[in-house]
Image: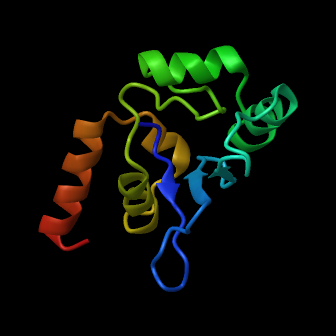
Amino acid sequence: MEGWTPVRSARGRTGTHHITYELALADGRVLRTRISRPADRSDHGKSMWAHILRDQLEVDEDTFWSCVQEGVRPDRGVPEVPVGALPADLVHLLMTNLGLDGAEVARMSKEEAVARLQRYWMEGG
């Protein structure tokens, strides 16, 4: 649901009694958690559950259950993309190929930016 992926070994396996998952965050960090059962088949104790939530999943219990039951993704500082923001590749092309400065590009709508780049390509620079 949130984008966690199983970690595979060099042989392509996910493991036998522990399954490890990773979640890449927007800020470059990677969260990692392991799903396992205690050897005596009991449940994890409160302190272990608190450790998993805090240190591996980086959420509190309410946030965890909200994600599981309602699909609400935890806020881990993922920046919101402003409405009408230009794609990074488009900004890069405008600045490097056309030599526009960042302030000029920031004032453009997506339609204006695409039209300006298309003109550049059609007129040959």
Vertical order, 29 against 54 (above or below): below
Nearer to me, 54 or 111: 54
| Residue 9 screen position, x and y as percent | 55, 78
Query: x, y percentage for residue 12?
Result: 45, 79
Asked whether the viewer can see residue 72, the reply is no
Quadrant for the C terminus, please: bottom left
Q: In this rendered view, identify the residue nearer to me: 5 or 13.
A: 13
Above or below residue 1? Residue 61 is: above
**What residue lies at 17% left-to-right and 57% top-to-bottom?**
119
Q: Is residue 82 left or right of residue 62?
A: left
Which residue is at a point 36% across and 36% down the rendered structure image? 108
Horizontal and vertical percent for residue 62?
66, 14
Residue 86 location, quadrant: top left
Query: Is 82 in front, or is 93?
Result: 82
| Residue at 52% over, 52% down | 101
Q: Position of residue 27 (x, y in %)?
A: 66, 48
Tally the marks: 0
Compared with 96, 4 (above or below) is above
Question: In which quarter of the view is residue 97 placed?
Answer: bottom left
Give the residue drawn at x 51%, y 26%: 73
Residue lying at the far right of the rendered structure: 47
Say whether residue 54 is left or right of residue 100: right
